[in-house]
Image (cartoon, rainbow, N blue to C red):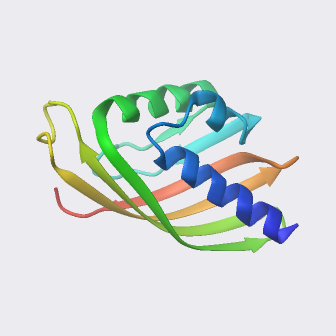
């Protein structure tokens, strides 16, 4: 079971980090009742709690904004149906926007907690600490 949860979490980060992945790739990993909680950070100052539909909209928006991105998952610690994740996200801005110039590389150090139910992600709670822009 532990290795199944770890592989699910790693697959999730691979899909999220791959600009060529599809919404169906991501939806296949989420439980239908999934919630994604993003705690306040420089990009999302008020944080957010999102449904699957809202998270898919954010997935699309991120793909439209970035020219490249990667997630480097450093470790996944599993306990029962939960996993703690430590990762680094790197993204390169690909379009003009009012906050960050095109070509800027952003880096966030991520601590996240994932709950799995029925072999799919039920809850993803993330604490993203961005390096200065």
> In the orientation shown, which residue stands out farthest toward the front?
20
Residue 9 lies left or right of residue 80; in this view the side is left
Where residue 93 appears, as percent x and y from the top left, is: 23, 42
Q: Disc count in the image? A: 0
Choose between 99 and 6: the one closer to the eye: 6
Where residue 128 appears, as percent x and y from the top left, is: 41, 58
| Quarter of the figure with the C terminus | bottom left
Q: Quadrant of residue 113?
A: bottom right
Where residue 105 appears, as percent x and y from the top left, is: 21, 54
Q: Quadrant of residue 85?
A: bottom right
Question: Which residue sits at x=84%, y=49%?
Answer: 119
| Quarter of the figure with the N terminus | bottom right
Q: Quadrant of residue 61?
A: top left
Can residue 114 be seen here? no
Question: Which residue sits at x=70%, y=38%?
Answer: 34
Where residue 40 appears, as percent x and y from the top left, is: 39, 50
Residue 70 lies left or right of residue 84; in this view the side is left
Task: Judge whether 17 appears above or below 53 on screen.
Answer: below
Question: Which residue sits at x=65%, y=39%?
Answer: 35
Choose between 131 and 66: the one closer to the eye: 66
Task: Judge whether 112 appears above or below 91 on screen.
Answer: below
Can residue 57 be seen here? yes
Question: Which residue sits at x=72%, y=65%?
Answer: 6
């Amino acid at each position: 079971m532990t290795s199944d949860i770890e592989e699910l979490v790693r697959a999730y980060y691979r899909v999220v980090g791959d600009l060529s992945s599809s919404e169906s790739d991501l939806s296949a990993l989420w439980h239908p009742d999934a919630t994604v909680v993003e705690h306040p950070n420089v990009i999302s100052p008020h944080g957010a709690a999102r449904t699957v539909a809202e998270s898919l909209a954010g997935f699309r928006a991120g793909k439209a904004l970035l020219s490249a991105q990667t997630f480097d998952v450093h470790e996944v610690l599993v306990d029962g149906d939960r996993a703690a994740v430590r990762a680094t996200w790197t993204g390169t801005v690909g379009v003009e926007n009012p906050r960050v110039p095109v070509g800027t590389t952003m880096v966030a150090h991520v601590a996240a907690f994932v709950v799995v139910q029925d072999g799919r992600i039920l809850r993803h709670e993330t604490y993203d600490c961005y390096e200065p822009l």
